[in-house]
Image: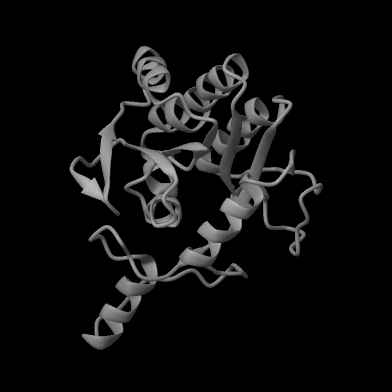
């Protein structure tokens, strides 16, 4: 099997890369922000805002499985630059889905619980989505392209925590650092979230990706 991981230099992407690389699986790692090597795999810079670049690098990768974790994932960043959020979270996802269909390749899309409005709580996959943010809307629109594939799978993850593999502290590491230094740290007080540890998330995604599970 040959696996393509987009967003491989992100917090979750790095754990996905580690999962496959340490098991000797042939893995291609795309990054929009980093070069060099991670987990023994060369990071391949790919600009997901350029469809020609996506296609060129995809044809070079020749994957059998795509795990698409690249995203504009910071809610504030998506709000400040909605065009970029849509280009990466929606348009690039649609292009990858088309390439997956054309090349008979399985595609797994990492989405978010922020496709829901939070009014109901305890959401299940089949509950109606109603995103309130630019980020949530762009991810939900990206889901549609993958769900149209015969072998497409969408996995919605919640708040992730754990130890960073990429040199940038995770949310929890930032929180612990602030506590240790006696510094204030701004948090939300109007949400109930179910955190998921990064390595557990990556392993669970890999299991689902390698199964015959499709849809949501």
> Splitting the image into 4 quarters, where does residue 49 fall?
top left
**Residue 72 in sight from this viewpoint:** no
Query: Which residue, as the protein is rendered here, is positioned at the far front?
Result: 24
With 93 as the anchor, is 182 left or right in this view? left
Classify residue 190 as left or right of residue 45.
right
| Residue at the limit of the structure toward the right, as seen here | 126
Q: Quadrant of residue 143?
A: top right
Residue shown at the point (34%, 17%) measured from the top left:
53
Task: Identify which residue, 86 or 2, lies in the foreground.
Answer: 2
Q: Residue furthest left?
A: 36
Percent x, y of residue 24: 41, 50
Q: Is residue 171 left or right of residue 169?
A: right
**Quick one: 49 or 83, which is closer to the camera?**
49
Residue 174: in sight, yes or no? Answer: yes
Q: Residue at x 32, y 47 (%)?
A: 9
Image quadrant for the C terminus? top right
Q: Is residue 95 left or right of residue 179?
A: right
**Above or below, comparing residue 146 to residue 201 in the picture:** above
Q: How is the image coloured?
A: one colour
Q: Position of residue 155 (x, y in %)?
A: 63, 47
Q: In the image, residue 186 lies at what x, y percent?
A: 37, 71
Q: Quadrant of residue 140?
A: top right
Above or below for 69 versus 145: below
Task: Report the number of numbered marks.
Answer: 0
Q: Residue placed at 62% from the left, 45% from the top? A: 209
Q: Position of residue 104 (x, y in %)?
A: 62, 21
């Amino acid at each position: 099997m040959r696996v393509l991981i987009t967003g491989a230099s992100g917090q979750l992407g790095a754990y996905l890369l580690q999962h496959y690389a340490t098991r000797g699986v042939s893995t291609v790692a795309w990054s929009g922000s980093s070069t060099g090597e991670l987990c023994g795999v060369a990071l391949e810079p790919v600009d997901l805002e350029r469809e020609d670049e996506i296609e060129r690098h995809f044809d070079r990768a020749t994957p059998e499985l795509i795990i698409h974790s690249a995203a504009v994932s910071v809610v504030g960043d998506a709000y400040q630059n909605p065009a970029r959020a849509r280009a990466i979270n929606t348009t690039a996802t649609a292009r990858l889905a088309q390439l997956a269909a054309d090349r008979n390749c399985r595609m797994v899309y990492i989405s978010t619980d922020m496709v829901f409005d939070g009014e109901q709580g305890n959401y299940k996959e089949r509950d109606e989505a109603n995103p309130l943010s630019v980020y949530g809307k762009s991810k939900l629109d990206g889901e549609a392209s993958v769900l149209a594939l015969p072998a497409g799978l969408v996995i919605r993850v919640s708040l992730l925590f754990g130890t960073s593999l990429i040199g940038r502290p995770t949310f929890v590491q930032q929180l612990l650092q602030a506590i240790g230094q006696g510094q204030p740290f701004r948090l939300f007080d109007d949400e109930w979230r179910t955190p998921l540890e990064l390595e557990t998330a990556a392993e669970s995604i890999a299991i689902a990706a390698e199964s015959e599970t499709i849809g949501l």
